[in-house]
Amino acid sequence: MNEQQPYAVIDGHGAMNVFEIYIKTTPERLWEAITDEEMRSKYSFGVGTVSEWTAGSEYKSGVPGAIEIAAGVNVEVDPPRRLVQTFTALWSDDVRAEGESRVTWEIEPVGSSCRLRVTHDQLSADANSELFGGWPMILSGLKTLLETGDLLDTPGSLRYAEAGS
Amino acid sequence: MDDVFKALADPTRRELLDALHESNGQTLSELEARFEMTRFGVMKHLKVLEGAGLLVTQRRGREKLHFLNPVPIRTIYERWVSKYAESWAAPLSQHKHDLEKEDER
């Protein structure tokens, strides 16, 4: 097994989930796709994320006038490699009750591709799986967008897109 | 994608993924305790799963934790299943799940 972990040691407490995907793109394009409101919405159920993307700045995810999805603070911003955010889900009373967790985005160039790892930790041991259950669809949609320019067109992937348009 | 299917084509490796699905982020020792197999045998299976991207590891302090990475399975799902509306498939698979639960009783 690979002992050369490129990833920072996560010092988190509580439950952790890790999601990883390889995408044929550059770190810069990948960073843009994560931090650009319009690009982000294309693979995030139609949900855009707005922020100044500086350390300590806040971010908000949602569809204006339709639904609030999440909010938090950008704890570490190191483009195009690493982004650490606090995460509070807002889309229902159940997920709001879960409180704050943490999401770490790590981009590692591998040949002509990038390995993107999203670590969602500081979750409660019995955290509602809705909190992190969307990551596989989001990351898969991000790969499709960057590699083909297409959008996923499953009903779930476009859940909030019409509400926002 | 070949790697994913090869990795999944083994009952022990599917059991390892089930164990992580049940409790994500386990050490080698924790995983090993679930199987009547040598440590080396479990490590070999974990290596195949890691090579297929179905398993990722992360360090927490001195421990190396193993996590189920469901993203490649989602990608396979989208390749073939997404053509059929999820809104149809989801209630049907839930129904199948419910029926199978009933059978287990």
Image (cartoon, coloured by chain):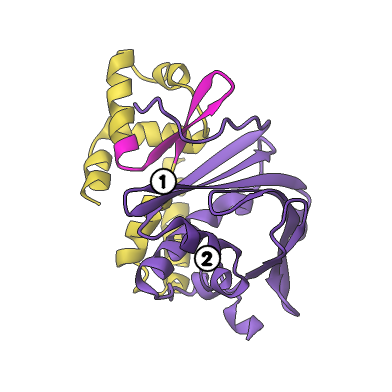
The span shown in magenta is B50-68
Which label number is shown at residue B103?
Answer: 1
| Residue placed most toward the observer, B43 or B30 | B43
Amino acid type, callout 1? Asp
Chain letter, colour yellow in render: B
Chain letter, colour purple in render: A
- Tell me: residue B30, above or below residue A157: above
| Residue placed most toward the observer, A1 or A121 | A1
Residue A43 screen position, x and y as percent: 51, 68
Residue B68 screen position, x and y as percent: 44, 39
Residue at (34, 26) in percent of width and height? A1
Residue at (34, 74) in percent of width and height? B83
Regarding residue A59, the answer to whether it shows in the image is yes
Label 1, label 2: how far apart the Cα atoms are: 46 Å
For label 1, the SS is helix
To which chain does the residue with label 1 belong?
B
Label 2 belongs to which residue?
A33
- Tell me: residue A62, above or below residue A7: below
